[in-house]
Image (cartoon, helix red, strand yellow):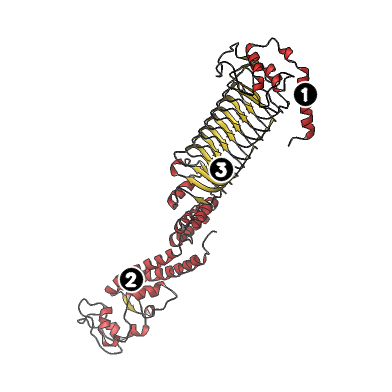
Amino acid sequence: MTPDWRLAAEAERAAWAVATARLDDFRPLSSAEEDVVAKLLTGQFDRLGDGTRPDAPDPLRVVRAAFLRFLILGGEEGCRPHEKGIRITGAWITGVLDLEACSVFRDIGLNDCHFEAAPVLRAAIINRLFLNGSRLPGLQAERLEARGGIYLRGAEVEGEINLEQARLGSNLECDGAVIRNPRNHALRAQSLEVRNVLLRGADLTGSIALSGAHLTADLDAAGARISRPEDVAFDASEVECRGNVMLRSAHVEGAVRLIASRIDGDVDCTAAVIENAGGGALDLSRTTVKGAFFLRRDARLDGMLALTGASLGTIHDEAASWPGPGDLLLNRCRYEAFIDGPVDAGSRLDWLARQAPERWGEDFWPQPYEQLASVFREMGHGEDARAVLIVKERLQRKARRARARHPLWRLLLAVSDGVLGATLAYGRQPLLAILWLFGFWLLGVAVFTLAERQGAVMPNSPVVLRAPDWTLCGFEEQERRPLIASGETHGLAAAGQTQLACFRDRWEASSYPAFSPWMYSLDTLLPVLDMGQRAFWRPNPTKPGGGIAISYFYFQSIVGWALSLLAVAGFSGLVKSS
């Protein structure tokens, strides 16, 4: 609130101005001024001419700004304005309407008027100001205090509207206004205190500066056109807005900044077009949006969307409205859910892939992936969450390898990451190790079955290997071989029969366990199991196919140990980076 001493000082100044001015000082009055005085006490709009905005200084419409000031400040006895205030439409106002530091407790209504000079209301205290449909070369109202609002609906302003540090009890309404100040601010309102800022359908050439403003309701620029190419067109940084920020169907040439703001409602960019190629299009860094962020229905950002450190309620978007590759910043951005947008890992990983950490001197940002996975889990999409974390692990490990200086260390990391990725999906899918074990088991069955058919399997017992039955089965019946122990000199194998097949046909081998490729492969693969096969049989490297079988035997034994340990590590969570 304004201090009592200031109110007293301003009231004294206004009283002095009224006391020192007389109606006679302005005589002779123009016909328009005579008309205003005649209707002064009615409280109705005093229409000059047909009430439309004049395009030329018609003598029937010309009113001096100094005369208006005299009336606005109270006039004199017998010539005082109605309690509703001054209401004039269709006037051509000459000179500067200077109300700087004045106190005006009635409305000022100058609609559809043409001002030759920008009105000055710096540090003034007023009730309400109506300039709807008027044409003026600017408005200087820094530090203005108004019980109500300022209304410029449909106005044409060729210059700057300056409301820096102003305090309005109601709205700043510029719906449909045309404001042109190409080289600077069209609307300067830093630290403005207001209820609503309404720019719906407005056309502004020049920037909007609302940084540090406090709004108890909405900032609404739906359908507005704002042009400040290659610069900041709309700066609402550090704004406190208890309502919504609406850019629905707006077209902005230049950057839109809502940095470090607090918005209790939504940020709605539905069908908005923001163009700032090569720079920032929409910057919501460190902004808190308690409601939703809308970016859909053919919305287009030609430039960067920065959500670094932002906190959003929900995201309502569509893939067609996402910024291009390299133009998305999501590091440390937090949000609660996706509504009416893609909710699958494939689409959202493409969304995250539009980030380019290297553009900012970073190698990888893990937080956006963790955040996405967390949201997927909370929305019940567990498989999508796991897919996101797998990609996150792969990219994070890739970045770690890139940071390694020694080539040998990079090679070891590449091998380790490759194995963990292929077998466990970096610990995110430990069941994958079971599938690998199953695959090696089947491969072992095939290898050992082939070895058995080629007779490249032999008993794993020195006693059996020295027995005559096994030894003589290695020769065909027509071959004769001397044996020291038994004296037998002929073989036991039939023509074309393998030593293993011949041995199986012997009565002496009936008590020896049968060879099973299925159980032998399982026994070799899983070190914790003992199926009894490996203790009784082993590949014979002296037979065709035996070399391959014995090599695979050793390989599968190592792989079995490794995959078993990896499976345990995966299920226990030891492999995950985080």
The answer to whether residue 454 shows anywhere in this view is no
* Residue type at tag 2: Val
Vertical placement of 266 versus 6: above or below? below
In the depicted structure, whether residue 565 falls above or below residue 355: below
**Horizontal and vertical percent for residue 359?**
54, 42
Q: Real-space Cα distance between discs 1 and 2?
A: 108 Å
**Residue 462 against residue 226 in the figure, above or below:** below
Residue 319 in picture, x, y percent from top left: 44, 44
Say what secondary structure mark 2 lies in: helix
Distance Cα–Cα, label 3 vs label 1:
61 Å
Rendered position, 15 above or below 299: above
Mark 3 residue element: helix
Looking at numbered disc 3 in the image, what kind of residue is underneath it?
Answer: Trp
| Quarter assignment of residue 53 | top right
| Residue 219, percent from left and from top | 58, 37
Where is mark 1, residue-wise? Answer: 15
Q: Which residue is mark 3?
A: 360
Residue 441 rendering spot, x and y as whole percentages: 37, 69
Camera-side mark, 1 or 2? 1
Q: Is residue 17 left or right of residue 524?
A: right
**Front-most of 502 and 444?**
444
Q: Nearer the viewer, residue 540 or 204?
A: 204
Which marked residue is nearer to the observer: mark 2 or mark 3? 3
Write down the residue under mark 2. Answer: 445
Q: CA distance from mark 2 to mark 3?
A: 54 Å
Please give left or right for residue 397 compared with residue 91 in the image. left
Q: Which mark is residue 268?
A: none
The local crowd at label 3, few if under 14, some if 14 to 19, many if 20 or more residues have their Cα within 10 Å, is: few
